[in-house]
Amino acid sequence: LASILGIATFQNYYNSISLVDDSLSQRQLSSSWIERHPERGVSAWARNNFRPLSSAPGEKETVLFWHIPKSGGTTAKSIYRCLDQTIATRLPSSVSRTEEKELVAFKPYGQRGGTYVNVDMTTRSGMLRAEKMGLVASGKADMLFAMDPSFAGEHLYDKQHKGRILGLFRHPVDRLASKFYYLQKADWEKSYRPEWADMSILEWAEKHNKESNVMVKKLAGVKFHDTATEAALRVAMRTIEKRFVVGLTDNMKESIRRFNIVMNIDLTSNRNQNCMRKFFGHGTLKTNSNPHPKLEPGSPAWDVLARDNALDIQLYEYILVLFDQQGEVIDSYARGISQ
């Protein structure tokens, strides 16, 4: 799919998907109709509260980073903490200061640690607290890391405080395999599953994995236990195409380069140059990496996970196309900044 798709041919693929639970006709989905209605099909939270890729970055845009588990989000946090970006995520309760009634940007680990805002972006109650305290409007955070982009986008941003959305993406089957091996060892995680160590990945895939097309569901507003349809896939594709700056876990260096341009991060300082060398120089540091056996395409476990996540795989293949084509747009941002 990735070899035949492109921005110019997206409409043909978009038209080819059957219309499930959708009022749009094939006539409405023609190329000319899409050109006249470029925002149709984009999730409302993204359409209303985030800037499109066609809009060059402004001086101050609070970034929403979609943290998809086991896709490089933890490494991205480490990189941007090093690059002195103020981050909203979740801290251990002993240092989080989330009981305070005012937003505070602080360094919980001293001058050598990163700067954080005293909010919890990992729960809906934490994000509602951040909304009530006016997190985005306050300008205290440079980046918000959230696993639920639709909820964060709807509640923390608005038309007067529009943001920019970034995300790192990994092949859905590789991501799930990584999750299986990681959580059977990660006793520091709330979702630690030591019992998984006693089963094969095929048994886990067939009987214990509960994830199915979670990327499509998160973007299209489908509940976790509900079934994602091809209509939801179309919404996810349009939302990614129109609003996301996409990065790839398999091409982290180029992805971070693009993110830095979008966020207008100054890489001329010695500090920031040292940060980039730390992560991408000789002997690259891989934060939160978890070596594990490779799951081969075509193996029984791969086929089960691919079957259960077929829509996410289609979305990922389209993201590969977007990644190839967004480079030129983002480089044009850099040229505009330098002029």
Image (cartoon, rainbow, N blue to C red):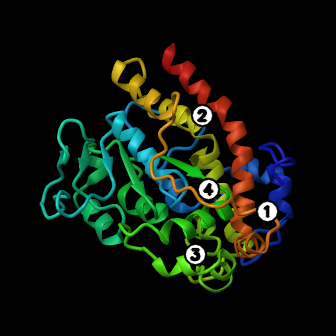
Residue 203 horizontal/vertical position (percent): 66, 82
- What is the C-alpha distance between the residues marked 4 and 1? 28 Å
Q: Tell me: residue 115, above or below residue 229.
A: above
The three-letter code of the residue at mark 2 reads Glu
Q: Tell me: residue 119, above or below residue 166.
A: below
Q: Specify which label sits upstream in the sequence, 1 or 2.
A: 2
The three-letter code of the residue at mark 3 reads Val
Q: Which mark is residue 297?
A: 1
Q: Report the mark closest to the observer, 2 or 4.
A: 2
Q: Tell me: residue 205, above or below residue 241.
A: below
* Residue pointed to by mark 3: 222
Q: Specify which label sits upstream in the sequence, 4 or 1.
A: 4
Dot 2 and dot 4 residues touching (CB under 8 Å): no
Dot 4 and dot 3 residues touching (CB under 8 Å): no
State whether residue 123 appears in this view. yes
Q: Report the mark closest to the observer, 1 or 3.
A: 1
Q: Which mark is residue 124?
A: none
Using the image as rendered, state which of residue 283 and residue 156 is in the foreground: 283
Badge 4 element = helix
Q: In this rendering, would 251 be left or right of 48?
A: right
Q: Report the mark closest to the observer, 1 or 2.
A: 1
Badge 2 element = helix
The three-letter code of the residue at mark 4 reads Thr
- The image quarter in which residue 253 lies: top right
- The image quarter in which residue 101 lies: bottom left
- What is the C-alpha distance between the residues marked 1 and 3? 28 Å
State whether residue 163 appears in this view. no
Dot 1 and dot 2 residues touching (CB under 8 Å): no
Q: Which mark is residue 254?
A: 2
Q: Specify which label sits upstream in the sequence, 4 or 3.
A: 3
Dot 2 and dot 3 residues touching (CB under 8 Å): no
Which residue is at the far front?
A: 198
